[in-house]
Amino acid sequence: MQEKLRTPYIELRINRDFGDIITVYFEFLRNNLKKFTNVFLSYNGIFLVGLLVVSYLFVSGIIGLITIGENGYNGEGTVDETNYWLYLGVGGVLFILIFLAVAVMNYSLAGSYMIKYESTKGDDFDKKEVWRLFVQKLGSIFLFILFLIILYIGISIVGIILAIVPILGILAYYVLMFFMIAWFGVSFFVLLQEDKGIVDSFGEGWKLVSQNFWKSVGVNFILGLLNGILFLVVFMVPGILIGIYSYHVVENDVNVATSFLPTVIYTIGTSAILIIMVYSQSLSQFVNGILYFALHEKTYNTNTRSKIDEIGNTEL
């Protein structure tokens, strides 16, 4: 029987420079995309259905309001708009709740996945272990997110004040935002990996990121830009399909109010866009995972020291 080929393990605890971190990120993504997607789909089923429902409410409300506008313009009388505005209102509330829940969970699942990957040296773990780590840390994660929201609001206010200043203020705003993303992301990995408290995790994250300020900002800027371009291309697929169908609707004077097909097409397209948004957000957490291990090794040399000790023990 042919032995199953194992995916090459990418050692994360290495002091890497700017370019190496970017290279390793895409290598890690290529080797782990299939396995992490399996984790993503396994534990997001109910939320993906929820996003489909939200998309249906949005589409139904918008189509209804458009139809009302057209009827009013054509002098065909007015229609009660309450139900359609209710669709949009309920859809909006559900979207906020579901998106926040999904964002927090997948932010955590991506971090848990990378922690298990590093601790088991690659492939020797399954999705249940990732989920188990997430559940074990759920209380700390919840408190971390609350603390993060408070910090985010405060830093955002400072960023908005800076953005008022022409050119230099705007540049300072973006530097501050990317520093904040790096700080929050690295601090989250400290929470998962080192079992520290909330305040200590943010403190350790601040230490690692501030000591490597431009590396942390630059990695998040470059990989954020590249990831944005990559997923913009993916977004174009449902976007183009919706655009083509919309052209068909306009050219053939299709009555979207009486036909069920437009609602189905637009609902599927909208839900696909929302799911891609959630998925891309979870993958972006891998950026700060690789950054965390690189900065931690640069600061503490734990992996290097363990290798030296192993060599010394072997020689003895």
Image: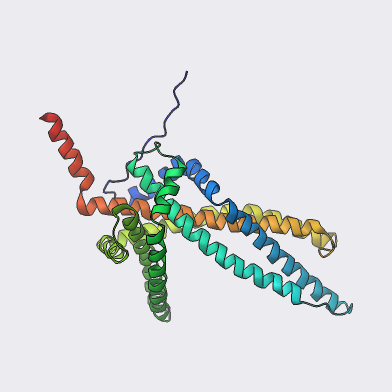
Q: How many numbered marks does the figure carry? A: 0
Residue 46 quadrant: bottom right
**Residue drawn where x is 31% and y is 58% of the image:** 215
Asked if residue 207 can be seen in this view, the reply is: yes
Q: Which residue is located at x 38 percent, y 69 percent?
A: 147
Asked whether the viewer can see residue 248, the reply is no
Residue most extreme to the left: 316
Residue at the limit of the structure toward the top, as seen here:
1
**The image quarter in which residue 274 lies:** bottom right
What residue is rendered at 37% in x and 70% in y?
176
The residue lying at 71 percent from left, 59 percent from top is 266
Residue 119 drawn at (x, y percent): 33, 43
**On-image quarter of the C terminus:** top left
Please say if 284 is above or below 59: above
Is 264 situated left or right of 2 in this image?
right
Could you tell whether 153 is left or right of 268 in the image? left
User: In terms of depth relative to the viewer, which is nearer, 138 or 145?
Assistant: 138
Residue 48 lies, in percent from the top left, at 60, 54
The residue nearer to you, when weighing 20 against 126, is 126
Residue 141 location, quadrant: bottom left
